[in-house]
Image (cartoon, rainbow, N blue to C red):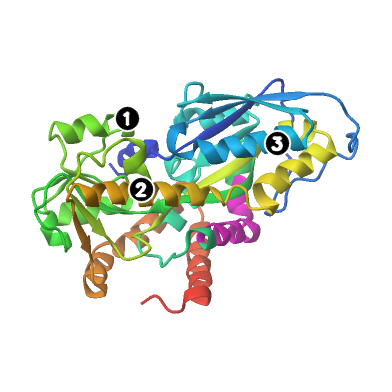
Amino acid sequence: MKRKLLLALALVFAFSVVFSACGGGSEEPADTGSGEAPAQNEQAAETTSDEVFEFIVNVTLGEPVSPNWARLFKELEEKSDGRLKVTVYWSNSLVTIPEIPKSMMAGAMAFSNVPTNNYPDIMPLNARILELPFLGLQDPVESSEIYMQLLDEFPEMMKEFADYNMFPLAVTTLGMYGLHFTDTKEVRLPSDLNGRQIVPYKLEFLPMLEANNAAGSYIPPGQIYEALEKGVVNGYVNNWAFQGWFGLTELMRQHVEIGEFGAFHEYNVLCVNLDFYNSLPADLQQLLVDTFRTNGGYSDMWDDTAALVASEKEKAKAKGDVFIDLTPEEIDVWKKAVEGNHEVALAEIAEQRGDNAGDAIYERTKEIIEEKYGPQD
């Protein structure tokens, strides 16, 4: 049963960006056991090649986030003197989220934004551990840096990407999770969820819902608006950006804010296909690294997300929605209601992988968070 739930929730939404390249080989991926960028192609021309490398960009829900992506795409074209040529397909019209890893492995795509929480079946170390509720993550950019630090320290995390011919180039977050409802029946504690139909969009919340007589239903993101409108469900656990992308703000009436940083963060990892990367001249390889990682271009995607979040909150306030800011004492109740699921998740990961790599990553994650923010208990 747990396995079925795991696979069902593997389709949880996160906005996805896919770069598809012409050509691409089938060579074995390079051994990238650290967070350093793959070694540049020593045989490639450094700056003199006139060859044009065309690739396709397929963006899920481009409306709110397209300005920043469009800027980065234009920057690539301009700084490469037109040698990197981008064609953009908005609204996820080429490759869907479930298809990304295998498409990358097959060499059909040059870049992909990999929303890790969608793949607990094939990359549990990346998909689940850093997204466990109430770990204590705070600033979104710092959270991305913690992720990259863990990638540097744990080859097991890198291998989950390398198995699909991907190298994680940069990390960003989509926002912090809270609870949202179509009615104003007050929710301050888990016990207030009694009788509700909720889309948790997170595996670790299911036991907590069941314990409080709330039904957890999985509704694909594309169908969530209709489900809420028709009363099939009356709430969900997700971030404000999700609400904005799917136009849900107009339906919701109550928003439960779980502190400044939410219950947890959700990560998106920009991956480069190693065959495509190795096909580029050295100067274009460096341009990609500089644009998305060294100069923080990908981490800066949070700026657009933050602007969207602020806009959606203003819309909700303008129409009189109820905002509930939980007290620290109330947040502690929620934390205790789900904290046992950390051990459950680690046990499931160990069983799935046949090792205890997850335990070491979990303990190191907590260490880094405490180093940054102090004790979390």
The image shows residue 83 at horizontal and vertical percentages of: 78, 28
Q: Which residues are magenta?
A: 143-159
Q: CA distance from mark 3 to mark 2?
A: 29 Å
Is label 1 or label 3 in front? 3
Is label 1 or label 2 in front? 2
Residue pointed to by mark 1: 222
Circle 1: residue type:
Gly
Numbered circle sitting on residue 76: 3
Tell me if mark 2 has few (under 14), some (14-19) or many (20+) residues whose alpha carbon lies within 10 angstroms of its own.
some
Is label 3 or label 2 in front? 2
User: In the structure shown, which secondary structural element does the residue marked by tag 1 occupy?
Assistant: helix
Residue positioned 74% across, 34% down in the render: 78
Q: CA distance from mark 1 to mark 2?
A: 21 Å
Tag count: 3
Circle 3: residue type:
Leu
Is residue 259 highlighted in magenta? no
Residue nearest the observer in this picture, 132 or 172: 172
Tell me if mark 3 has few (under 14), some (14-19) or many (20+) residues whose alpha carbon lies within 10 angstroms of its own.
many
Tell me if mark 1 has few (under 14), some (14-19) or many (20+) residues whose alpha carbon lies within 10 angstroms of its own.
few
- Confirm whether residue 28 shows in the render: no
